[in-house]
Image: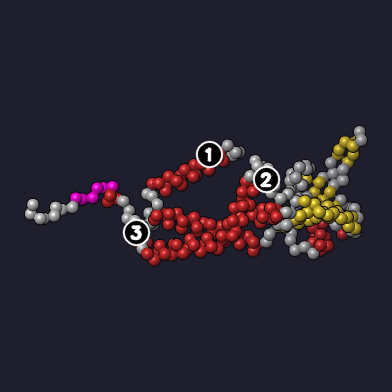
Amino acid sequence: MDGITPPAKDPSPAARKKAPAGVLLFVPAALNRGAFITWLKRVHAWTGFWGALMFLVLGISGFLLDHRGQMKIDTGEPREVMSVVLPVDPGSITSQADLGKWAQAQFHLSMEPRAPRGGPGGPRGEAGREGGAQRGERARFMGREVQQAEVWRQQFSGPNGALSVEYTPGANTVKATRSEQNLAGVIKNLHKGVGLSWPWVLFLDSMAGALTGMALTGALLWSRLHGPRLAAIGIVLASLGLALTAAWSNLV
């Protein structure tokens, strides 16, 4: 032996292609440097911190909504707490819009009215309604056909409850009904934005942006710590495939 160290063997193709530890797999080489990675971590952390509490609320309410049918979970159906019949000048309410304006003035409401849910615009399970009005339909009563009176309905909904008003054209009274939600119902309505104004919509938009930012930055940071690129692509495709498979049978 002459003491000369033999030359090192060329690395295998697989070894040459393997990304070094700490390199972001889905980021161009020009951005794979400390400053960008530090910024990525900060974005991920701050977006998570901004929405942490609301992410928990949205997750709980989403679970309640998703399982309300299969697991018979009470998601907070409105419960009627009071009802009154108020006098009104018959000539002061000539349309459904007038009914809504009357209720706004009577109860000092800032929110806008809408037609109650269900059917083509009426409460759930009731037919023959359009835009909060029940048309005067004929019905069998005590062995004879009678003509039912038309009824106008308007509703003011908030996250903690609702106020609905009913009026028969030409009558001198209006029926007002107040319903309330339990805590689960309030959380559910906050999730759906029921009866809330544009500031809440913008706030939920910021939550959606935070979730999007966390998802993107989290995927990039994950690629720096775990597994090859092929494994990441496989996980994403498997997740999408499972979601499509689960929803396919219910598509119409």
Q: Residue at x 26, y 47 (%)?
A: 13
Task: Return the residue at label 2.
Answer: 73
Identity of the residue drawn at 90% across and 53% down: 171
Q: Is residue 252 left or right of residue 144?
A: left
Q: How many discs appear?
A: 3
Left or right of 164 in this view: 141: right
Say which residue label 3 marks.
Answer: 29
Q: Nearer the viewer, mark 3 or mark 2?
A: 2
Query: The residue under label 2 is which amino acid type?
Result: Ile
The amino acid on which the numbered mark 1 sits, given as a three-letter code, is Thr
Mark 3 or mark 1: whose residue is earlier in sequence: 3
Between 47 and 88, the one nearer to me in the picture:
47
Kindly check if marks 3 and 2 are in contact, taking CB atoms under 8 A apart as contact. Answer: no
Residue 219 belongs to the span the image colors magenta: no
Q: Secondary structure at mark 3?
A: helix
Quadrant of res 225: bottom left
| Local crowd size for mark 1, using a 10 Å CA cut-off: few (<14), some (14–19), many (≥20) | few
Label 1 sits on a secondary structure element that is: helix
In this figure, which residue is indicated by the disc labeled 1? 245
- In the rendered image, the vertical position of residue 36 relative to residue 5, given as above or below: below
Q: Earlier in the sequence, mark 3 or mark 2?
A: 3
* 3 and 1 marks in contact (CB < 8 Å): no
**251 vs 223: above or below:** above
Give, as a three-letter code, the residue at label 3. Ala
Q: Residue at x 11, y 55 (%)?
A: 4
Extent of the magenta region: 9-14
Tell me how far mark 3 sits from mark 2, CA to CA: 50 Å
Graded by Cα atoms within 10 Å as few (under 14), some (14 to 19) or many (20 or more), the crowding at tag 3 reads: few
- Secondary structure under badge 2? loop
Q: Main secondary structure of the magenta part?
A: loop
Q: Find residue 70 and report its horizontal and vertical position in percent.
A: 65, 41
